[in-house]
Image: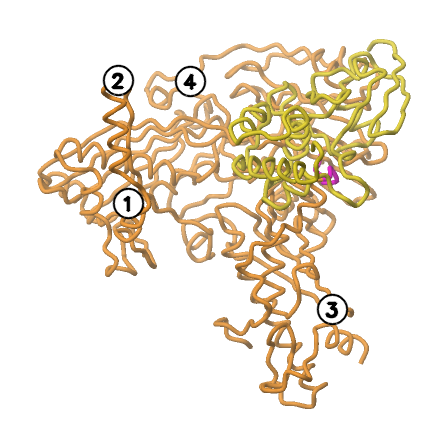
Chain colours: A yellow, B orange
Amino acid sequence: MGASVAVQMTVNGQPCEDAVEPRLLLVHYLRDRLGLTGTHVGCDTTNCGACTVHLNGEAVKSCTVLAVQADGAEVKTIEGMADGESLHPLQEAFWNKHGLQCGYCTPGMIMAAADLLERNPDPSEEEVRHGLEGNLCRCTGYHNIVQAVLEAARAGKAAGVGA
Amino acid sequence: MSTLEDTHTGNGYVGQSIRRKEDPPLITGRGRYVDDIQLPGMLYASIVRSPEAHARIVSIDKSAAEAYDGVRLVLTGEDMSDLAAPLPMAWAPPGVEMKTPEHWPLARGKVCHVGDPVAVVVGNDKYAVVDAAEEVLVEYDPLPVVVDIEKALDEDAPVIHEQFGSNHSYDWSLGGGDVEAALAAADVVVERRVVNHRTAGGAIEPRAAIAEWRAGYLTLYSTTQVPHLVRLQLAGVLGVAEDHFRVVAPDVGGGFGSKLNIYGEEALVAYLSRRLERPVRWTATRSEDMQAAVHGRDQIDYVRMGLTRDGSITALHCKVLADMGAYHQLLTPFIPAFTAFVMSGCYKIPAVQTDITGVFTNKMPTDAIRGAGRPEATHLIEVLVDQAAYELGMDPLELRRKNFIPKEDFPADVAVGITYDSGDYHGSLDKLLQNLDLDAFRREQEEARSKGRYLGIGFSTYMEICGLAPSRAVGPSGVGIQAGFWESAVVRVHPSGSATVWTGASPHGQGHDTGFAQIVADRIGSTPEQVEVVHGDTDRGPFGMGTYGSRSLAVGGESVARAALKVQDKARKIAAHLLEAAPEDVELAGGKYQVRGSPDKGLGLGDISLAAYVP
């Protein structure tokens, strides 16, 4: 066990400071220290994408990022996506389009899709499928997930903002 | 008592596509899966698993692990000799000799597959216990390994469970008609060896379990599809009374059969929590889940199909060699029996016989994964039908049409001894072809072929037994599974008119909260928003059989519907009293209880329930 290292970061707009083992994974920091259990671990190996969060605005798989690598960063998790009672367009679209079954992959899907729409606000269906290839849904709900992301893109366009 | 034919006259929610009630927490990161649960003083368990497929355990040195900072306890199989019973297997077909080896949460004396648990390390830091587990020094004496089910039956094959003298687990047959005579008389016999490879369920949420033993009362949170069965069976393994034992399946991240079991790790955390009087959590890594959750399929099928020259199938025989893996889990040997039950497929075949032999190998046990035995049958039947079409020079679709059970035969008794209640297979195929431009596919195929690219067009039909029930068919007096195959439900209306439904089904993505709320809302005159569905907690609802085999809506939904109709009956009586009318004159229409023909004086459910609670 190595000595603790000080980290500070902003998570969903809240500043936080902690002392962590250098090997502590970001996903475990979020889940176990901050209680943000919406970010899930599905594979431990960067395959499934269930643990996807935003690190300085970019989607990363937090099961293979060390907490110390997020030192000084802005982190956003699924818990930070809604604006109070008002759901993020992607959350709304996943609900509307039955984009989830067991819900375990859903936070990662939404975070990955948000990053995709940030980079490409008006993707084709093929671009959505390609954009989400790093996220697995074992309930095999890809069709509705893609439909949800396309609906969110349309909603974002209608609102005149990026999703 | 209401009749089931349609006394519900609510607001027509069944059939509507509504947004799921369970989604808001799941899309906002507020779900509650087992690994999300933190209990005060919780300890973490890490399991030492065998890297050997078959070996004697010579020695286990725990000392380095025990000395590790933060480690509370290290246990081996021998340290747990006070467990009341081994892990259960629940299939006892009448008259069949079934060889079921003892199977313990931690191996005793030898390991029989890669991943077989050997020791467990418990401590207060989830990283430290993994470090310490690597310090548990196990000396193995490797034994010859058997992984091929055919070679496993050879005279000189290494024997995994010495007490049985061979790797043979059981034989079981199902059939009807004289298959050998029909094959002998057939114009053509098509034969094939079909390998159905091993697969993993691979739910996206790895398995996990937390046990909390507190003042003689045990609570187990588990990623399970069958919380009530887990309580019943583990009560026996642990020697705990069911009334002092609660099992909770919170949000569960998919199962596909891989969480339809009674697992050693569930018993292990419960045992550890009792011993340490602290909550204990174990969560599988993905690699661990692949070694420690049951696998599926793994059959080799020797199939013979007899036909007349003009393409009538007269006989089907299948010899199934089924890989049990190293032990029998809850339903391991039963799964290939499912293959036998659906061996007639969609076809009218006068003689059908399936002979199953279960075989032990040095692999993770198999059990119910995605279709559980039935897709195996579909695969081998359809492969043989295509092969027969090829050998007879017939169009594969024409051969299927010729042998489909005709619509007018339903209800149809098939040779394996069951009755198909309804079907229109010709009609289904016609409809498919209407919706499919086969000619265009053929043109595309030709075009591709002219460019040297091969494009295949194939058809497959299937018939599956779904919605496992009733008890007389599937239970002890039927095919011999030691369980009941009913489902339970309680519907309770609160004073203000909202309602809670308790179901014995236990979802892991299926959407029971929404579907069952629709069913109940229609029957009691409410809305899905006002009906809360509770499941997956043995302390909060009645005993139930859980969710698997496409049974929840068909069986669980039916029990919910019947319970709701009883509530409607009661509400009608109270409404009749309030409206000074005869109960038989009160009807539920458009969500109101009203005297027939007097809709203006209708009562809402809330009016009635409040009057019932506060007369």
Query: Horizontal and vertical percent for residue B429?
Result: 28, 47
| Residues at marks 2 and 3, CA–CA distance in whole angstroms | 69 Å
Question: What amino acid is found at the position of numbered circle 4 in the picture?
Answer: Val
Query: Horizontal and vertical percent for residue B14?
Result: 55, 61
Question: What amino acid is found at the position of numbered circle 2 in the picture?
Answer: Lys
**Nearer-N-terminus badge (3/1):** 1
Residue displayed at 54% across by 37% down: A141
- Label 1: which secondary element: helix
- Say whether marks 2 and 4 touch (CB < 8 Å): no
| Residues at marks 2 and 1, CA–CA distance in whole angstroms | 27 Å
Question: What amino acid is found at the position of numbered circle 1 in the picture?
Answer: Leu
Of the two numbered discs 2 and 1 in the rendering, the one whose residue sits closer to the viewer? 2
Note whether B511 is above or below A12 in the view shown: below
Label 4, on which residue?
B146
Q: Residues within 10 Å of mark 2 (few under 14, many from 20)?
A: few
**Nearer-N-terminus badge (4/1):** 4
Instruction: Report which quarter residue A157 is drawn in.
Output: top right
- Label 2: which secondary element: loop
Label 3, on which residue?
B497
Q: Would you say residue B537 sits in the magenta stretch?
A: no
In the picture provided, is A87 more to the left or to the right than B90? right
Note whether B346 is above or below A149 in the view shown: below
Label 2, on which residue?
B451
Query: Both on one chain, marks 3 and 1?
Result: yes
Query: Both on one chain, marks 2 and 3?
Result: yes
In the picture provided, is B411 more to the left or to the right than A29? left
Query: Horizontal and vertical percent for residue A117?
Result: 65, 29
Query: Both on one chain, marks 3 and 4?
Result: yes
